[in-house]
């Protein structure tokens, strides 16, 4: 799978003008989702170390809406994509391994990049997440280990937005400087300008 | 005469074990090891190895064909890395690899385990946790000379500086 959304900028201050800063500077009316905003996502499909392969994409969706200043800006169920960073089947003396990453939520023709995915041990159906033996959850980078790793569809994970993201209040979003300059710069501009 | 021999033996024993004793002082309970925050815009990976199997077998961690560091039993090192996908390999009679997604501002943990091979123990890289790292009775930082030639594993002085910087 392509890695176009995988790398966060390595910290080039000169290129760090984010979408929200641009919008605020232009005095546009809208709402900013700050970088590193926590989200809860849901796996839309089951994953297993027995069948998954490195580089595969998997479907995710937003488990709870993103609300900024009392306004729902991203609804529950918004679809997105994750990527299997590493998958290994069980071997002699070693368990299966899965390393997952949340990549983005699709918002119309734009993509809100995600990062810092961690399984949190909960699930939509409270099915106790019938993970196989030895699964650890809540690990940085979404590390999971065990004999076999079987993650059911509906498993919840925490993630964060990887970039500041601007919504125009009249519904017409900013022309997409996002992919070019919507860098991952933490900010605290969560207010309507 | 016997007394002289005994005293000499004790002195000789002390002298021969002194370097070992000095080296042991660098071992620290993992629970009290300070791992600094990664530099701004960077992530980091802590590699550690416990275990008793394959004590003589090194676990040499490589990325892109370049050595990051050797990792002996009871050792650890910290690697600062730019965000994104990183793939690490170890190799003996068989190759094992582990890919990670390094995130800015975050620390991830990887353990090197030795599993029994046909002829020699085979190193195996696996994702781990800070809790598993802290659970170790004692861990010691890898010696600078066992680290790779390039940027990667923080040398002892670099690690000390990073700890100092992140505690400010």
Image: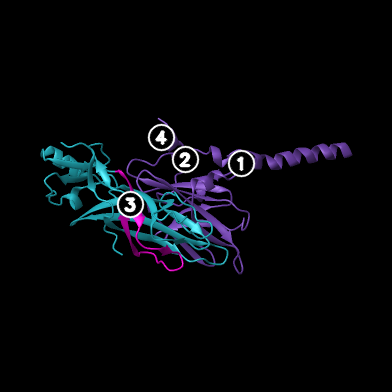
Chain colours: A cyan, B purple
Asked whether the residues under marks 4 and 3 belong to the same chain, the reply is no
Label 3 to label 2, Cα distance in Å?
A: 33 Å
Rendered image: mark on residue B166: 4
Circle 3 is placed at which residue position? A63
Residue A19 percent across, percent down from the top left: 18, 45
Mark 3 is surrounded, within 10 Å at the Cα level, by few (under 14), some (14 to 19) or many (20 or more) other residues, namely many
Residue B29 percent across, percent down from the top left: 58, 40
Secondary structure, mark 2, is: loop
Subunit of label 2? B
Is there CB contact under 8 Å for labels 4 and 3? no
Label 1 to label 2, Cα distance in Å?
A: 21 Å
Secondary structure, mark 1, is: helix
Is residue A91 covered in magenta?
no
Asked whether the residues under marks 1 and 2 belong to the same chain, the reply is yes
Q: Is residue A90 left or right of residue B138?
A: left
Answer above or below: position of B155 versus B126. above
Rendered image: mark on residue B35: 2
Label 4 to label 3, Cα distance in Å?
A: 35 Å
Circle 1 is placed at which residue position? B23
Label 1 to label 4, Cα distance in Å?
A: 27 Å
- Quadrant (top left/top right/bottom left/bottom right) for the N terminus of chain B: top right
């Amino acid at each position: 799978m392509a890695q176009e959304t995988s790398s966060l900028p390595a910290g080039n201050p000169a290129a760090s003008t984010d979408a929200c800063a641009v919008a605020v500077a232009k005095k546009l009316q809208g709402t900013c989702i700050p970088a590193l905003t926590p989200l809860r996502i849901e796996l839309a499909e089951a994953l297993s170390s027995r069948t998954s392969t490195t580089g595969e994409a998997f479907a995710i969706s937003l488990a709870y809406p993103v609300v900024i200043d009392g306004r729902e800006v991203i609804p529950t169920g918004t679809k997105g994509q994750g990527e299997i960073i590493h998958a290994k089947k069980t071997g002699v003396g070693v368990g299966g391994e899965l390393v997952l990453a949340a990549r983005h939520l699709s918002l119309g023709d734009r993509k809100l990049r995600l990062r810092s995915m961690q399984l949190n041990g909960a699930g939509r159906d409270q099915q106790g997440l019938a993970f196989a033996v030895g699964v650890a959850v809540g690990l940085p980078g979404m590390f999971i280990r065990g004999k076999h790793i079987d993650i059911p569809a509906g498993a919840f994970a925490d993630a964060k937005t990887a970039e500041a993201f601007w919504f125009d209040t009249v519904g017409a979003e900013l022309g997409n400087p996002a992919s070019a300059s919507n860098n991952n710069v933490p900010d605290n501009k969560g207010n309507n300008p | 005469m016997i007394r002289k021999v005994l005293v000499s033996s004790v002195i000789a024993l002390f002298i021969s074990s002194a370097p070992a004793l000095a080296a042991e002082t660098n071992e620290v309970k993992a629970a009290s090891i300070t791992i600094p925050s990664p530099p701004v815009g960077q992530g980091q990976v802590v590699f550690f190895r416990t275990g008793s199997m394959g004590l003589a077998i090194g676990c040499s961690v490589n990325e892109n064909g370049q050595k990051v560091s050797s990792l002996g039993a009871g050792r650890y090192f910290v690697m600062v890395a730019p965000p994104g996908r990183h793939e690490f390999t170890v190799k003996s009679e068989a190759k094992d690899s582990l890919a990670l997604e390094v995130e800015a501002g975050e620390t991830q943990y990887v353990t090197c385990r030795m599993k029994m091979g046909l002829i020699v123990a085979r190193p195996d890289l696996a994702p781990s946790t800070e809790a598993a790292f802290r659970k170790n009775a004692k861990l010691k930082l890898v010696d600078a000379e066992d680290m790779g030639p390039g940027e990667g594993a923080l040398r002892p002085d670099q690690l000390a500086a990073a700890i100092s910087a992140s505690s400010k």
